[in-house]
Image: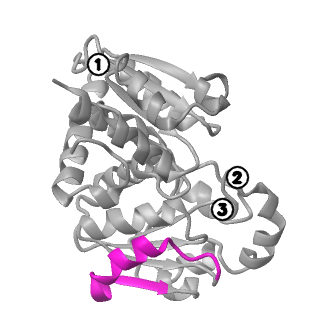
Amino acid sequence: MKHLLSLLETSEQDIQDILNLADIVKAEVKQGIYKPYLKNKTIGLIFEKNSTRTRVSFEVGAVQLGAYPLFLDASTMQIGRGEPIQDTARVLSRYLDGIMIRTFEQAEVEALAEYGDIPIINGLTDFAHPCQVLADLQTIREYKGKLEGLKMTFIGDGNNMCNSLMVGALKTGMSFACACPEGYLPDPKCLDFAKAYGDKFQLTNDPMEAAKDADVILTDVWASMGEEGEAAQRKAVFEGVYQVNAKLMEQAKSDCMVLHCLPAHRGEEITEDVFEAHANEIFDEAENRLHAQKAVMVLLMQD
């Protein structure tokens, strides 16, 4: 694995290697052990979107690994004034040992990988959020002891989270069901990928159907970053149907987990009572962003 652009480009073994190493570095932190896997390395962190978890977890993770994280606000870089991405990639490759970028277009991440000579990590695009889903898979495995044979269900917008969860779940032996309204379906590339898994994949407009016998249910906000202008329109489509609530949870297994990538809009995509009942799982999931991303940085950047 040379880059982490999306989970479509990773193998099942790549994902398992990341999760296994994530467990190791997490255990080390819990014991107060900080091995300098990336001593004297520098990673550039480019942000074109707002961030809490991605920025803090990558900065802290890099420091814990012995690397130096360099925060790069795209609005203050030449890329924000129109410098071609291929030129930015060539220049930064001569200064840095790796780049994490959180942006809008997947093409921008792929261009950095094409024209640069260093590992590129997708910290979020409108198409994919692989780092979050690796943390989700790590959390599920911690709670359930396995991934293979479990059923994952996603309720809501067929967005970057749905795309990446679909791929990550199927590649690790889980079945995947998603309930999305017409007009808000997952990306066609991910749907084409999922079709090869036959009855292990389910796409429906009915959340109750998707949630039946689920081992883990996930959701996300109805309007993602960059879609704020559609918030009222989207609320009219999703409200009252595409919500993780007590009635929906009755369809799932009695020990079903609930995860949310955060931030959560309580009362919209998830009710307050369900969120709080599963808060331990959700905040373990948030913590695991740190550990999963440390594993990604080590596997990509270590000599």
> Which numbered disc covers residue 226?
2
The quarter of the displayed image where residue 95 is located: top left
In the rendering, at what x and y percent does residue 206 appear?
57, 88
Which residue is under mark 1? 32
**Vertical side of 210 occupied by 224: above or below:** above
> Which numbered disc covers residue 273?
3
**Vertical side of 13 occupied by 98: above or below:** above
Question: How would you rate the neighbour count of disc 3 (Cα within 10 Å): few for under 14, some for 14-19, many for 20 or more?
Answer: few
The alpha-carbon separation of the residues under discs 2 and 3 comes to 28 Å
Q: Secondary structure at mark 2?
A: loop
Q: Is residue 86 left or right of residue 260?
A: left
In reply to whether residue 114 is colored magenta, the answer given is no
* Mark toward the start of the polypeptide (2 vs 3): 2
Labels 3, 1: front one? 1
Residue at x-position 55% and y-position 86%:
208
Residue at x-position 63% and y-position 33%:
82
The quarter of the displayed image where residue 155 is located: bottom right
Question: How would you rate the neighbour count of disc 2 (Cα within 10 Å): few for under 14, some for 14-19, many for 20 or more?
Answer: few
In the rendering, at what x and y percent does residue 81 appear?
67, 29
- Between 222 and 211, the residue placed more toward the observer is 222
> Which numbered disc covers residue 230?
none
Q: Secondary structure at mark 3?
A: helix
Q: Secondary structure at mark 1?
A: loop
Q: Give, as a three-letter code, the residue at label 3.
A: Asp
